[in-house]
Amino acid sequence: MSEQTKDKLIIFDTTLRDGEQSPGVTLNTEEKIEIARQLSRLGVNVLEAGFPVASPGDFNAVQRIAREVGPLMEGRTGEGRVNQEMVICGLARSVQHDIQTAYDAVKEAPRHRIHVFLATSDIHLEFKLKITREQCLQRIKDMVGFARSLCADIEFSPEDAGRSDHSFLCEALATAIKAGATTLNIPDTVGYNTPSEYGALIKHLRENTEGADSVVFSTHCHNDLGLATANTLAGISNGARQVEVTINGIGERAGNTSLEEVVMNIHTHPHSYPVQHTVNTRLFFSTSRMVEDLSGMAVQANKAIVGRNAFLHESGIHQDGVLKNKQTYEIIRPEDVGVTTGNLALGKHSGRHAFKTKLEDLGYGGPALSDAQFQAAFAKFKDLADSKKAGVTDGDMHALVADVRS
Ligand code: KIV
Ligand code: ZN
């Protein structure tokens, strides 16, 4: 399938809203603006900048992002296309004051959206909202309708869709469409679904909701069972054309779907997903580090795509393989996601091939060491590696060379 015949996949980033709901994370306005600019450069299409009614600080941050970042057109794809202006979005409960506040915060962005949500699962209706299904439908009609009277771009989310009754969900979504919603987001709020269930849910809703053809279906998956990326990809395979994601997968509890994982799956398996996106994958590593630093949420070392170990090879067999041909143990070119540092982790599993390559990188190639000095340095390196949990550093290597040369 050529790029032209592929559907556009809308990347909706919620790092600054659902991501900021990670326990212990609070970003100040300047930090949010810095991340928003980076997300614009990255090529994100919709930026959920916050939940404006939550606090005056949140309102102010969303309003400044709408004014200062909304008009930028910085994003570029890997192929050099310019990203369209990002849509700036604000979240609102199905309450008139929330919706008005969200609109006031985003309205100065050239492209803006209000995201309205209301739970539809019986457990949320009965215990949290204490309303009946009929009252729920009426509230969707009234509040989506009110949002639409303010703004043309309206997203509706039936919270806890993953555990909602399917036929009631179809009724709720049809009500939202009639009231003016243009995007329907399907949250697996508690990360309960399996990929086959979530994919089937998207298919069912697209096929059985009145008016479904006129709207975009969106995924919003949480990672409680470690399935957020798999569920999101299943959603795409079943017709979702927007994905809600965060950088590094940060978010409530076990987090949200990670942006970089979804995009790199599409990049690695272009024939499996009939969609194209506008993200510049080469900015992944720097964006990940920025979000890690500003949010204080450390990225686990073995996290796919952006973890510190994601492109590091430690065992002698793997190191020997990648030195001969990188594709022996690499399915993604590190430079495609912005990783430019070396890919060999020197430790007790490393062999002579990796040791020699590292020496060459450090300027001790060719005649710098005699054969006997090289053998002595390698033996000392093995002893040292056995005793160092964190691996052998460049400083250690310089000391080893000095030692065998003295
Ligand atoms: O997980 C969820 O249900 C949400 C909604 C507010 C979209 O974040
Ligand atoms: Zn969420």
Image: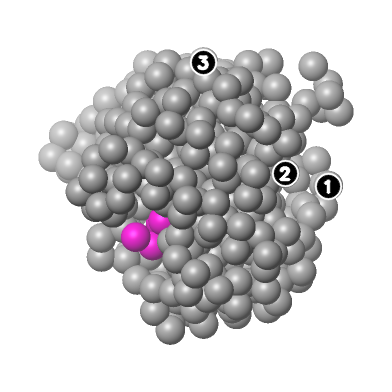
x%, y% of residue 386? 16, 34
x%, y% of residue 9? 68, 37
Q: Say which mark, if any, is on residue 324.
A: none
Residue 320 appears in which quarter of the rendering? top left
- SS for dot 2: loop
x%, y% of residue 277? 70, 38
The answer to whether residue 179 is left or right of residue 220 is right
Q: Nearer the viewer, mark 2 or mark 3?
A: 2
Image marks 2 and 1: residues in contact by CB distance under 8 Å: yes
x%, y% of residue 251? 36, 52
Of callouts 1 and 3, the N-terminal one: 1
Near-viewer residue (119 or 221): 119
| Residue shown at 54% from the left, 51% from the top | 141
> How far apart in space, not on screen, are marks 2 and 1 (Cα)?
8 Å
| Residue shown at 78% from the left, 26% from the top | 6
Near-viewer residue (239 or 127): 127
> Total label count?
3
Q: Is mark 3 within 8 Å of ligand 2?
A: no
Say what amino acid the circle numbered 2 marks: Thr
Q: Is residue 240 above or below residue 155?
A: above
Q: Is residue 45 magenta?
A: no
Check disc 2 and report the residue beneath it: 278
Check disc 1 and report the residue beneath it: 81
Q: Say which mark, if any, is on residue 328.
A: 3
Say what amino acid the circle numbered 3 marks: Thr
Of callouts 2 and 3, the N-terminal one: 2
User: Which quarter of the rendering shows the N terminus?
Assistant: top right
